[in-house]
Amino acid sequence: MAGSPTADAAPIPRETDLAALATRIEGWARELGLGAIGVSDLDLGDAPARLADWIAAGRHGTMDYMVRHAGLRAAPADLVPGTIRVISARLDYWPGEARDASAVLADAGRAYVSRYALGRDYHKVLRGKLQSLADRIAAEVGAFGYRVFCDSAPVMEVAFASKAGLGWRGKHTLLLSRDAGSQFFLGEIYTDLPLPLTRPASAHCGSCRACLDACPTGAIVAPYEVDARRCISYLTIESHDAIPEDLRPLLGNRIYGCDDCQLACPWNKYAHAAADPDFATVRHGLDDAALVDLFAWTRGEFDSRMAGSAIRRIGHERWLRNLAVALGNAPTSPAVVAALRARADDPSALVREHVAWALARHAGRGDVNATQSSGERRT
């Protein structure tokens, strides 16, 4: 366990001091810019069984790591021996200065990037804040056992955050908060400190099904059940394969992730704009970029412009795959068709196949002037 106690470490506070320590930890967390924290024990209730059923139904798609590490998700003390508490934290990410999300989605020639990815890679930012919080705790109590996580290990973060009182699992399976919606990141500190537990939050979805009705591909197959194989976030980020042809038209102009279920959720009227400049600032105009411009990026341009961004992990090939689908869904125009034709012989078979599909879509619309290059047009 990182930060495990040493022989000359200061003693951990007596049980009577732990409530005061928890209060100080909450204050330090807010000083670091975290939106809220809570503390839970390791009892995950029926969450491991629900995860097992989800995997058994094949709804994890090609995310084989979900299968490999299912046991560790269900047994936190096996992942980090000595753990008895989980400190869960949230960090708001909504970029207040970005172009209106609905307006971009309605503009088929523009690229829609999930709003969480418009700033710096959240893994580094939130993990850094949690490490700073752990360092501050150690300065107070001496060396203690802990390990910091931010979407970086098999952790059932929504289950722990819900139990810690940060919110409840919404019907879209994301964590929802009455005072912050769902547009935030989650991170954890597994620790051996016997901190007092915080009270779980009650659920407030009621009969609402806005998220189910808003999903473009019908991936929310039932309340609290998502089939990743139909989810646009999975298709554009997690999957390395060709996007199923029947789903491609449903992606619209979404090239990296999808926010539709969150945009439709009534609780997100309470979402907070990001206070951290790493998320408040939009990188490279990705909140309102033209599809044809992004499709022209070379591998080197993609790598350099996406350095420090969560987007970089999908790589240039899948970036082009996603853009080819969006261009196939865009209104037919000489610029769109020319951009696609420029990559018709791309070295990647994956890209070529999606480009061919997109060009066939435009050809099928019968706009000869748009689909022919200037040199091919009849005079």
Image (tube, grey):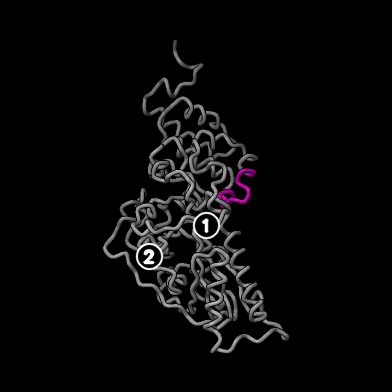
Question: Residue at the location (36% across, 28% down)?
Answer: 365
Please tell me whether residue 82 is drawn above or below residue 167 in the rendered image.
below
| Magenta span: chief secondary structure | helix
Q: Which quarter of the figure has residue 283?
A: top right
Disc 1 crowd rating (10 Å Cα; few below 14, some 14-19, many 20+) is: some
Q: Position of residue 233 (x, y in %)?
A: 46, 52
Q: Residue furthest left?
A: 207
Quadrant showing the N terminus: bottom right
Q: Nearer the viewer, residue 45 or 20?
A: 20
Q: Which stretch appears magenta?
A: 303-314
Disc 2 crowd rating (10 Å Cα; few below 14, some 14-19, many 20+) is: some
Q: Say whether residue 206 is left or right of residue 148.
A: left
User: Mark 1 highlights which residue?
Assistant: 275
Q: Residue furthest top?
A: 379
Quadrant showing the C terminus: top left
Q: Say whether residue 168 is left or right of residue 315.
A: left
